Image: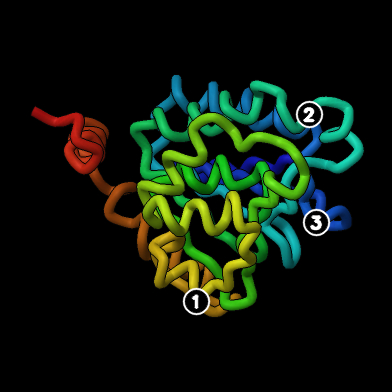
Amino acid sequence: MIGLDKAGARWTVTLNRADKANSLTRAMLGDLDDILAAAAGSEVAVLVITGAGKVFSAGADLDEAKAGLATDPVWERVSGRIAALDALTVAALNGTLAGGAFGMALACDLRLAVPGAKFFYPVMKLGFLPQPSDPARLAALVGPARAKLMLMGGARVSADEALSFGLVDRVVPDADLGAAVDALVADALAAAPDHRAAIKALCEGRGG
């Protein structure tokens, strides 16, 4: 239920449980963790994460969430691995992003969304805490008040609102999402690994 396409130095990971809105099970998160661990030890230059069908991910599988998955450390491990990659990481949000799936999108360098995507993280309503790193990453993108709007106020944010907030970087038509991602990653794929890593470090305040 996790697809992986390796095209040279570009890896594309697909959440592939479209009949369940790509809700994530413990097994799927384990597979993601394994893939990202392998990426960290490879020559990968670009990592793209997307979903099958019309939804990126509805978050945790509800049955498994109630059985403890909602607070499992695997979520934080997955987002941490994404954030630590020297590769250019892109969340190609083919539809709605909800709940625990926010972590992997927030950890990416860039987020592209289709016009019909919605964004919500209903931890207040459901009684769970967000992943530890998510509030700070969300606030860094949209500001503390808007982070509280989503995490505490339960706001459902449209793609256009997400763009104006800074939560996503571009909104592109569904049919153009793949081409838009291709255009954004071309320079990173062509760059020398040390050059790419140095620029990413400078953007993140790690250069000196």
- Three-letter amino acid code at the position of disc 2: Leu
Quarter residue 54 falls in = bottom right
Q: The C terminus is located in which quarter?
A: top left
**Disc 3 marks which residue?**
21
Between the C-alphas of marks 1 and 2, the distance is 31 Å
- Contact between marks 1 and 2 (CB within 8 A): the answer is no
- Three-letter amino acid code at the position of disc 3: Ala
Q: The N terminus is located in which quarter?
A: top right
What element does badge 2 sit on? helix
- Three-letter amino acid code at the position of disc 1: Asp
Q: Residue at x 65, y 21 (%)?
A: 73
Of mark 1 and mark 2, the one earlier in the sequence is: 2
**Disc 2 marks which residue?**
69
Between the C-alphas of marks 3 and 2, the distance is 17 Å
Within 10 angstroms of label 3, few (less than 14), some, or many (20 or more) residues?
many
Residue 194 seen in the current view:
yes
